[in-house]
Image (cartoon, rainbow, N blue to C red):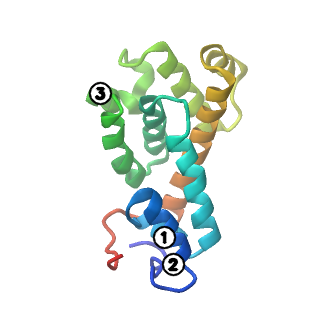
Amino acid sequence: MARIPYADLAHPDHVEAAEAIRASRKRVGHLHRMLLHAPPIAAGWITMFDAIRWKSTLSGKLRELVICRIAAINGASYEWEAHAPIALKEGATQAQLDALRDWQGSDAFDAGERAALAYCDAMTQRVHVPDDVAKAVRDLFPPRQLVELTATIAGYNCVSRVLEALEIKGTDPLAPG
């Protein structure tokens, strides 16, 4: 179970943010139900992650590969379970997902994916990105996509940290809503 109870969707302070979440995601899942304890954060979260997921020029496949890599590095099973099926729908292969935990030793990834995964590893594990890793992504991605990639990696590291700090699990029971 999560460290604190999930927010009540019917609470007057939560209704507006819950509607914004429903409008975007069609339902209010575990993570968003927890975020509703802080309605302005829940609403801002949706705005930011809608931009990352649906207004980015990065390919959905690359986006989901880095999200899954972050989940693997951070041991965020909820994040992995949510995004691995999306990765497959976006064009990643099961072989790529299987290789993601040790991607450096795999030939399942093209040059752009390898550069993005190295960048993801540096941002997630060390925060400071080595010059050679930054140059590799800068050489392959135009500025907009490099910013989108950076924001995606930073954002989904935030997701992992919230999920794991509050012990949010996809198997936790939720009241209807």
Instruction: Assess whether mark 1 and mark 2 are in contact (beta carbons under 8 angstroms).
Output: yes
Of residue 71 and residue 152, the one placed in the foreground of this image is 152
**Disc 1: CA contacts within 10 A as few (<14), some (14-19) or many (>=20):** some
Q: Which quadrant is the N terminus positioned in?
A: bottom left
Residue 72, above or below 37: above
Where does label 2 land, which residue? Answer: 15
Amino acid beneath label 3: Thr
- Is residue 167 in sight in this rendering? no
- Measured in 3D between alpha carbons, the distance from the residue under mark 3 to the one under mark 2, in whole angstroms, is 39 Å
- On screen, residue 34 versus residue 38, left or right, reads left
Residue 146, above or below 3: above
- The residue under the point 43% across, 65% down is 22
Residue 8 percent across, percent down from the top left: 45, 82
Point out which mark residue 93 bears.
3
Amino acid beneath label 1: Glu
- The residue under the point 43% across, 72% down is 2
Where does label 1 land, which residue? Answer: 19
Residue 104 percent across, percent down from the top left: 45, 21
- Measured in 3D between alpha carbons, the distance from the residue under mark 3 to the one under mark 1, in whole angstroms, is 34 Å
